[in-house]
Amino acid sequence: MTIQSPKDFWLQTLQKIEPSVQRAMLITWFKDTAILGSEEGKLIVGLPLPMFLDWHLEHYADLTLKIVQEFDPSITQIVYKVDISLQNGDPRVLDLLTLFPAKKQRKLPGKQEVRVAEGLTGKILNPRYSLDSFVVGSSTRLAHAASLAVASQPGGKYNPLFIYGGVGLGKTHLLQGVGNEILKGNPHAVVLYTTSEDFTNQVIEAIKSQKMEQLRRRYRQVDVLIIDDIQFFASKERTQEEFFHTFNTLLEGGKQVIISSDRPPQELHNVLHDRLRSRFERGMIADVQMPDYETRVAILTERAQGYEIFLDRSVVEFIAEHVKDSVRTLEGILMQAVAQYELEHRMPTVRSITEILEKLSRDPHAKKEEVGFTAPPLRAVRFQDVLEGVSRYYAISLQDILGDSRVREVMIPRQVAMYIGKTHMRMSLVKIGELFSGRDHSTVLHAVRKITEQMQGDAQLLREVRTIEREVGVQS
């Protein structure tokens, strides 16, 4: 197979790929890529950086192959090759910014808002927030049960529903989860989710434009009013007055009101009018607290499944043990671990999580010991360190790695150790062979070449090797 015009062929391919991906992703992941050649049914695609390899293998390889086969059915495989020279104005590279210009769109105000009724807008409910995806523990069981009851019977006996707790503990998840659940059962319901700040701004605007009566009518047509962070009504006399009357009207009409705060109603005596607080106290009050250790483990496991990433149990337990301030922080640590996995080809380990915790520490002088990991004394990496790192990672004994077994579960780790020894330790093939039961240098060379080639097309193996390299300290 011969590609007559690789550059034109690649442009045609990208034009067919574009409708299937966002422009920003196309520009990010296909910038400085090019067709380097073809041989025996394989199309060789050049990538500018090693971090591109894993991403293309996981997200674009199948799509790219499907599209190029439309132009040339003889192509049976996409082979990626990292070529850093593609970053430096290489003539083989397409100018994607020019060829795929951004489409001019009319700017829409309030893009995080949604129109729920005539003249009435609220915050968009995040579809990821559902009551089913909320991981329940002893510290949130009552709040979750109350939310389920309200979702199944809006305007029933749990009205109003008042949920309180600290920042990042799941209040917003529950509030929006109830809204999503109600809309799932009744798509025509008018569910308004807003914040105390937005409500205050609407009251101010209505006063300025002398349209208070219109604002009252609009709010009183909703079936479910969800208002977040009501403690910010503090010292806003007119806002509290309007909310009080709206609140009463909705409750009298059998409509559901759901409220969140950072404190229970009885602790808002310096914030809200007594008559408003007393109304809240007559309803269902539930708190959310920081989940216990077991629940934190369950949350991390569930979220990791959502990201389609496997976390070793020791890593999950390490995060759960050291992150105790909020669920939001817990998820933030996990998000950074996922980024390492996808962009740096690093499987999350206790060491890599320690690095993340150090970076997020408010104390720039925090030590590893403070987050449960003691760094070994600084010294040159030995090949014994490599062998031990491979042994730990694959859970295989050193005797098996150095021995004669030819089962795949042992062969791959053995070849990985040989590859790292040759690539990073500057060891001769003969020396490596001697360490592995006196193997011939040609056996070692075959192993190094095999791992090098397989890493070009096997995303999982690439991650495994990169993780071991980082763990033993031979990769920066």
Image: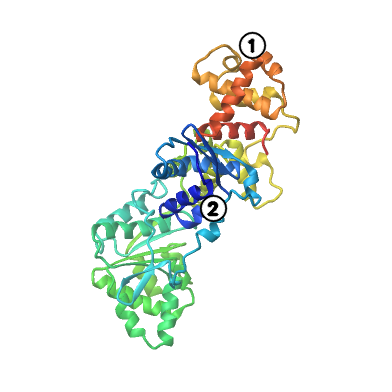
Where is residue 385? Give x, y as percent.
Answer: 67, 25
Where is residue 381? Give x, y as percent.
Answer: 72, 28
Label 1 amino acid? Answer: Ser
What whole-number distance in Å separates the C-alpha atoms at marks 1 and 2?
47 Å
Label 2 amino acid? Answer: Thr
Pick out the residue farthest to the front. 4
Sequence order check: which comes first, mark 1 or mark 2? Answer: 2
On the question of residue 432 being in view, the answer is yes
Front residue of this view, candidates 398 and 227: 398
Mark 1 nearby-residue class (10 Å; few <14, some 14–19, many ≥20): few
Q: Nearer the viewer, mark 1 or mark 2?
A: 2
Q: Quadrant of the C terminus?
A: top right
Where is residue 30? Give x, y as percent.
Answer: 53, 50
Residue 222 higher or lower than 92, as above or below: below
Front residue of this view, candidates 255 and 181: 181
Query: Would you say 320 lies left or right of 207 here?
Result: right
Q: What SS does tag 2 mark?
A: helix
Tag shown at residue 28: 2
The number of numbered discs placed on residues in the rendered structure image is 2
Q: Who's the residue at 64% across and 43% down the image?
A: 84
Which residue is denoted by mark 1 in the rendering?
Answer: 437
Query: Would you say 216 lies left or right of 264 here?
Result: left
Q: Who's the residue at 64% across and 27% down the image?
A: 420
Q: Who's the residue at 62% across and 38% down the image?
A: 372
On the question of residue 340 being in view, the answer is no
Query: Would you say 230 lies left or right of 50 here?
Result: left
Marks 1 & 2, CB-CB < 8 Å contact: no
Front residue of this view, candidates 451 and 146: 451
Residue 427 higher or lower than 340, as above or below: above
Where is residue 468? Give x, y as percent.
Answer: 60, 31
Front residue of this view, candidates 136 and 418: 418
